[in-house]
Amino acid sequence: MPATLEQRIATLERILHADHRRLPVFVSASVLSGRLQTHKGADVASADEITLGTDGNYFDVTGTTTINHINNSGWQNGSVVILQFDASVTVTHNAGSPTGSEASILLSGERNFSATENDALTLVYDGTTFREVARATDGGTVTTAELNLIDGDTARGTTALASGDGILINDGGTMRMTNVDTVQTFMGGHYKTYTGTFTSTTTGDISISSIGFVPTAAICMYGMSNTGETDAEGNWSLGWAYKTGATSSSYGMSYNYFQQGGTDVFDFDQSASYIGRLAYGGAKFSMLTITAWAADALTLTKSVAGTPNSSTLEYQLLVQG
């Protein structure tokens, strides 16, 4: 007795199921009234090139080896695959230079995807590459109100800033949190001021260290505020210098003001190799020189000429990076 149509279909289904074969179905337009049943394939180990099985469209990816390509054998245009990651692994955006059956992966934002456990990527094959159409990341705790704060139409507030407050920044394409203290250091890090005092008869070095940036220039206000000084009342100088080598400096003009016999006197020395220079009656008696430049430091050296009266001298140094 010949087999019925139902029996023949049942036999064909058993054969296809046993051999894991795919039965192509061609339709012009269809409306599904029920669920579309697909299959989860066997787990795939992460590798430079991963090969997805023919047993489904949803795959668990194990391991932590960076994924650069997907084997496109057996995949046709429009095929959709979902990769769920069982561990932290990087998926490379457009690794390029695919060979043989390798296909590159094009990711959202043209950036690599650093997946963590339970994250997932949905990709569609366009005949050349696998393109990301969606992703799911695990462990997000952002609220709708917090997310709305980055909307361009959000009203600007006047909340006072305090040390330790956070700021969201774009760090070379990756969004990161930093704090206002770090931003303050960066914004003000190219200028720092230092002050100090010493006795006019002393010599030696003044170490300016832990500047926080590479110093390249300095301006110095230097002098005495002791109006009882008999040699030179209110003696002040202004000078500047900039770095010209690993340890060498080039100096600008050094201006000097003092009172001599109740008369205001202005003096300057264009050829002076000092950032600070005090003089009286045309003769210098106390000098400051930058004798060393370093990665985040410089050295001021005190020197004297003749035998100056003992006075308290003060320097105010502005360092630029």
Image (spheres, rainbow, N blue to C red):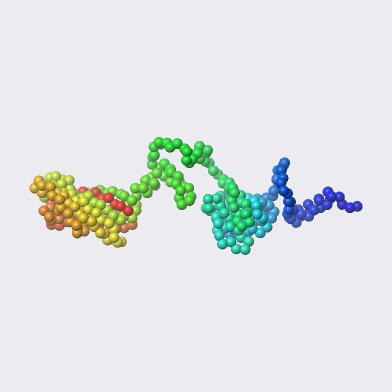
Q: Residue furthest bottom?
A: 100
The residue located at (27%, 50%) in the rendering is: 318
Indicate the position of residue 234 as horizontal and vertical percent values: 15, 46
Indicate the position of residue 24 as horizontal and vertical percent values: 73, 53
Report the number of discs: 0
Indicate the position of residue 284 as horizontal and vertical percent values: 15, 55
Q: Residue furthest right?
A: 1
199 horizontally vs 31: left or right: left
Q: In which image quadrant can residue 244 be found?
A: bottom left
Query: Is residue 86 something that shows in the picture?
Result: no
Q: Residue furthest left?
A: 261
The residue located at (72%, 45%) in the rendering is: 30
The residue located at (58%, 47%) in the rendering is: 135
Q: Nearer the viewer, residue 101 or 52?
A: 101
Query: Is residue 266 something that shows in the picture?
Result: yes
156 horizontally vs 1: left or right: left
The residue located at (21%, 55%) in the rendering is: 253
Indicate the position of residue 14 as horizontal and vertical percent values: 79, 53
